Image (spheres, coloured by chain):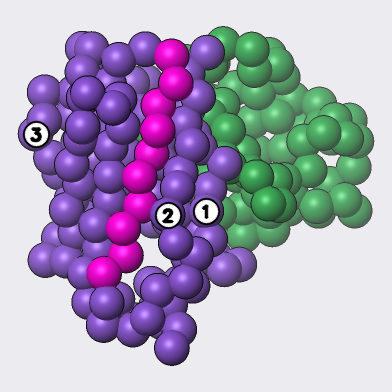
Chain colours: A green, B purple
C-alpha cells in the first residue's frame, strides 16, 4: 500500500508568513493528490485536488504543486483563520492520508 | 449543496457489530461519478479511509479492514451504510461519511459521529 509522509509535523508561524508543507508518497501517485484543512471538532475541508486544483471557494493564498512522489501545499500569507491541521491524501491506489501537519501560532 | 448526516449508536460493545447510516440530502446517490465514502479518525489522531461504494454499487475497502467491513447503499432512501464487525476498543473513533467526486477529492463531509467501543 502507498504510505504518505508529511513534513514537518508542526509549523510555528505568524500571520503574514509564507508556510510550506511537504508530502511524500512511497510510490508514484501521479497527480492524484488532495490537501485538506481540519480544525478541532470539525470535519476536514477540501482545499486542493489533483495536486494543484483549487477547490471552489478556497482562498487563492492556498496553492498546491508536485507530481509523482513529492507534493507541496503553500499558504502564501498566513491568515488567522489558517491555524489548523493540514492533511495530504493520495487517491491513486485506494486512499491514504498523511499523518497531518499542525500550523500553530508562533 | 450536498449535505450528509451520520446516524447510529454512539456506544458498541466489544465483539459486536458497529452499524452507521449516512443520509444524503440533495441529489441522488445513484447519479453518476461519485464515491460514497467512510473515513474515521481515532481520538487525537489522523484520518483513516475505511472504504467507499461507487454510485454503480461497486465497493472498495481499506485492505487492513476489508475482512470486517461492508458498505452498502439504499437508493430508495438515498442513504448508504457502514457495517464493521467484531469491533474492539481500537475501533473507537469519530466516523465520517463523505462524498468523493471522480478525481476531485472528498469535497463533502458529514459532521462526524463518535462511536465508542466499550463494555
Q: Which circle's residue, 1 or 2, is located before the other in the chain? A: 2
Tag shown at residue B58: 3
Residue B72, by quadrant, is top left
The mark nearer the N terminus, 3 or 2, is: 2
CA separation in Å, label 1 and label 2: 8 Å
Q: Which residues are magenta?
A: B17-26
Q: Is residue B82 left or right of residue A104?
A: left
- Chain under label 1? B
Residue at the image position 26 percent from the left and 82 percent from the top: B15
Q: Which mark is residue B8?
A: 2
What label sits on residue B113 in the rendered view?
A: 1
Indicate the secondary structure of the residue bearing disc 1.
strand
Label 2 lies in what chain? Answer: B
Q: Earlier in the sequence, mark 3 or mark 1?
A: 3
Residue A95 vs B19, above or below: the answer is: above
Q: CA distance from mark 3 to mark 2?
A: 23 Å
Disc 1 + disc 2, Cβ < 8 Å: yes
Give the prevailing secondary structure in the magenta stretch: strand
Amino acid at each position: 500500500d502507498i504510505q504518505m509522509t508529511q513534513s514537518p509535523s508542526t509549523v510555528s508561524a505568524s500571520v503574514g508568513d509564507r508556510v510550506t508543507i511537504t508530502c511524500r508518497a512511497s510510490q508514484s501517485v501521479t497527480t492524484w493528490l488532495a490537501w485538506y484543512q481540519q480544525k478541532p471538532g470539525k470535519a476536514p475541508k477540501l482545499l486542493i485536488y489533483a495536486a494543484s486544483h483549487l477547490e471552489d471557494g478556497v482562498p487563492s493564498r492556498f496553492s498546491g504543486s508536485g507530481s509523482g512522489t513529492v507534493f507541496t501545499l503553500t499558504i502564501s500569507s498566513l491568515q488567522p483563520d489558517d491555524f489548523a491541521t493540514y492533511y495530504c491524501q493520495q487517491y491513486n491506489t485506494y486512499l491514504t492520508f498523511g499523518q497531518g501537519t499542525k500550523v500553530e501560532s508562533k | 449543496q450536498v449535505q450528509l448526516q451520520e446516524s447510529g449508536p454512539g456506544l458498541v460493545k466489544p465483539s459486536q457489530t458497529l452499524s452507521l447510516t449516512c443520509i444524503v440530502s440533495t441529489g441522488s446517490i445513484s447519479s453518476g461519478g461519485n464515491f460514497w465514502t467512510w473515513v474515521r479518525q481515532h481520538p487525537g489522531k489522523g484520518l483513516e479511509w475505511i472504504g467507499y461504494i461507487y454510485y454503480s454499487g461497486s465497493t472498495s475497502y481499506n485492505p487492513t479492514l476489508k475482512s470486517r467491513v461492508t458498505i452498502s447503499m439504499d437508493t430508495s432512501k438515498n442513504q448508504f451504510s457502514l457495517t464493521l464487525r467484531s469491533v474492539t476498543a481500537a475501533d473507537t473513533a469519530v466516523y465520517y461519511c463523505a462524498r468523493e467526486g471522480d478525481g476531485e477529492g472528498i469535497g463533502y463531509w458529514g459532521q462526524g459521529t463518535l462511536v465508542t467501543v466499550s463494555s
